[in-house]
Amino acid sequence: MVKQHRETRQKQIVLDAVCARCDHPTADEIYLDVRAADEHISRGTVYRNLNCLSESGQISRIKVPGADRYDRRRDIHYHMVCTKCGAVYDVPLEYNLAADKLLEEKTGFSITRHRTVFEGVCLKCRSTMEK
Amino acid sequence: MVKQHRETRQKQIVLDAVCARCDHPTADEIYLDVRAADEHISRGTVYRNLNCLSESGQISRIKVPGADRYDRRRDIHYHMVCTKCGAVYDVPLEYNLAADKLLEEKTGFSITRHRTVFEGVCLKCRSTMEK
DNA sequence: ATGGGTGCAAAGTGTTTGCAAGTAT
DNA sequence: ATACTTGCAAACACTTTGCACCCAT
């Protein structure tokens, strides 16, 4: 039997906090925003709700080294991490569905999806670094 | 001034341990293999050497959720993680160099590389699960 | 001899979890 | 009434680090 999810004040605040941001915050950044809305919400509750919301597809979880990020965008897309400032950006490239199919054919594995993270230096850091 | 690297007995044992495996071991798995060769090598030394070896390009580091994996293969290639058993496999698809170039053109970012991790169920787990 | 490497244990990060009390359904 | 959720703190998993000693160069 599958667990039923409930709407709680805390969960709503966490969801609002994610949706209020246009970047890709870490759980801890969300926690800080949440605390600004309600001082009593605990870190554990924020983590639990982020997991719950991303499992139910209301937000998405981006797996990058260090700390995972959360995203109000719900469609699958790629990301880029700046190796200088650590910022995470959305990547304007199309999801390569053909790769999943091709890999299934080649290996017999059942492929759900893939995640791609680009590494490099963002425009902001490039201009700061130039001499 | 760049730091000079030295050849030590411990570093050699760590490198040998990685090269002796055909899967994608975690640092801790390497640590256990290393301990079998020499009881006195510490976890810290194994981590330090894995970092040092992957920075110098003698082995490569695969960033997957949970614990990073290490690979004796030195060429860039994609990986697949089985969501059932957690195993990491090499993916027989070509690296999409065009994506890096395209992203550079579209964003002005300087792209070094990208990392792709496929998610799904491996053949072994598929046959175990079938009813 | 010099400065990078080692072993040890402690500390650091990011995240999950056990529990008793609270609350949405 | 039931069973999911919360707050709290403790526990976890993975990795790094401070320090005094060691050893490759």
Image (cartoon, coloured by chain):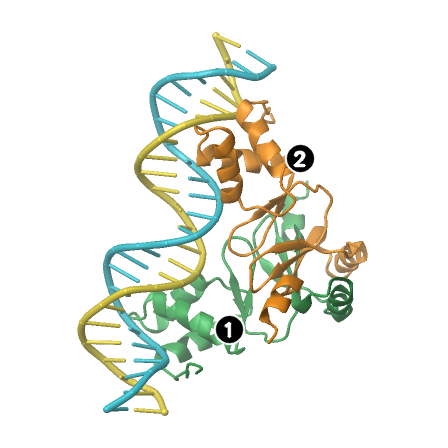
Chain colours: A green, B orange, C yellow, D cyan
Whether residue B54 is visible here, answered yes or no, is: no
Please name whichever residue, A100 or B86, is drawn nearer the observer in this view of the structure.
B86
The quarter of the picture where residue A97 lies is bottom right
The quarter of the picture where residue D20 lies is top left
- Location of the C terminus of chain B (image quadrant): bottom right
The quarter of the picture where residue B54 lies is top right
Give the amino acid type for the residue marked by disc 2 in the picture.
Answer: Gln
For image coordinates 58% across by 35% down, the residue present is B17
Please name whichever residue, A83 or A62, is drawn nearer the observer in this view of the structure.
A62
Q: Nearer the viewer, mark 1 or mark 2?
A: 2
Give the amino acid type for the residue marked by disc 1 in the picture.
Answer: Ser
Residue B107, above or below B24: below
- Which residue was labeled with disc 2? B58
Q: Is residue B129 left or right of residue B102?
A: left
State which chain disc 1 sits on.
A
Query: Callout 2 environment at 10 Å: few (<14), some (14 to 19), or many (20+)?
Result: some
Q: What element does badge 2 sit on? A: loop
Whether residue B75 is visible here, answered yes or no, is: yes
For image coordinates 65% across by 34% down, the residue present is B56
Coordinates of residue A43 in the picture (x, y in percent): 35, 65
Coordinates of residue A50 in the picture (x, y in percent): 45, 70
- Which residue was labeled with disc 1? A54
Q: Residue furthest front?
A: B131
For image coordinates 54% across by 65% down, the residue present is A24
Q: Residue furthest right?
A: B98
Query: Callout 1 environment at 10 Å: few (<14), some (14 to 19), or many (20+)?
Result: some
Coordinates of residue A131 in the picture (x, y in percent): 68, 40
Q: What element does badge 1 sit on? A: helix
Residue A24, above or below A3: above
For image coordinates 63% across by 50% down, the residue present is A125
